[in-house]
Image (cartoon, helix red, strand yellow):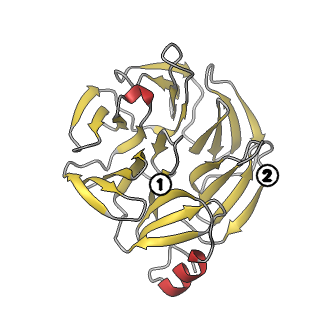
Amino acid sequence: MSLTAPLINSAVMEGVHLEVECEPVALCFHCLGMFILRADGSFAKIDQGYWSSAAVALQCSSDAILCFHQSGIYTVSAAGAYTRLSSDHWSCARVVFFSPETQGSIVALHDHGVYRINVADGSYTKMASDYWSMATAAVYVPGSGPEEPGAAIIFHSNGIFRVNLADGSYKKVASSTWDGARAAVCIQGEALVFHESGIFRVNVVDGSYTKVTSSRWDNTKAAIYIPEATEGQGSILVLHSCGVFRVNVEDGSHKMVSREGWDCLSAICPLGTQTYCSCMVGGNNC
């Protein structure tokens, strides 16, 4: 049964998938509730709420996720419990970052500017007035220390940009157009971008890129990098309108691991200690 169906038999939906013991890799906000996504592509429904107005979400501690929503900011646990921190409208938040450079706050790139959000109470300050409505995907590349901070990289209709998370300023890295990007992940200092024209490997320093495969990914909703427990580069789970796919990071080959479509996915929060960035779901507009 598809996630896009108006009614769900929860016994089938949850009973089958809850039997699978596998590491959770993301919390999914969906019009039919909240779902935990596991590394093998299986999932479990943990909340019956209606989350179609969620914009973006990001983990800010081991037990807390901040969800930016049309009706406010919510603190959400991995078990699905939530409380509302503020009633400000955040439906036009595009990308959020929580990294060493954000000093314990979340930095949000929004249609109306760049904001620093207090994770304790949802209060915010405006850092810059630049509009980010044409941002299509983003990655965060971790740095090696204070002298070499991490890089917040934005794929945009007008190019590739590097944003300073301390003050909201930015620098243009490349003029290539990325309005067809749907999702991106960071792998060993590079970005792998899922695009309507294929998969691209992008050098985030100068914006140069190579095309990995010409397979079309225009119905991609989100992409989650799954590191290998042992040596190796891992793989990527792609949530798509047609199902869930596991993608090889080397050659872009893929196989379907679930036939459940994710057309009604509103926002997704990667889980883990290295989840510094989250972007709006591919194809969504405020």
Bin the neighbour count of mark 1 within 10 Å (Cα to Cα): few under 14, some 14-19, many 20 and up. Answer: many
Locate residue 71, reporting x and y percent. 24, 56
Residue 277 versus residue 207 in the image, above or below: below
Locate residue 56, reporting x and y percent. 40, 49
Residue 108 versus residue 6 in the image, above or below: above
- The residue that appears at 61% across and 25% down in the rendered structure is 204
Q: Amino acid at mark 1?
A: Ile
**According to the image, label 1 marks what residue?**
268
Quadrant of the image containing the N terminus: bottom right
- Circles 1 and 2: CB distance less than 8 Å? no
Q: Nearer the viewer, mark 1 or mark 2?
A: 1
Q: CA distance from mark 1 to mark 2?
A: 23 Å
Which element carries disc 2, helix, strand or loop? loop
Locate residue 17, reporting x and y percent. 59, 76
Question: Residue lying furthest top in this view?
Answer: 147
Instruction: Looking at the picture, tell me which residue is in the foreground, 203 or 46.
Output: 46
Residue 37 versus residue 135 in the image, above or below: below
Tell me the number on the disc at residue 253. 2
Bin the neighbour count of mark 2 within 10 Å (Cα to Cα): few under 14, some 14-19, many 20 and up. Answer: some
Displayed quadrant of residue 141: top right
Q: Is residue 251 left or right of residue 267?
A: right
- The residue that appears at 59% across and 42% down in the rendered structure is 184
Name which of mark 1 and mark 2 comes first in the sequence: 2
Q: Amino acid at mark 2?
A: Ser
Which element carries disc 1, helix, strand or loop? strand
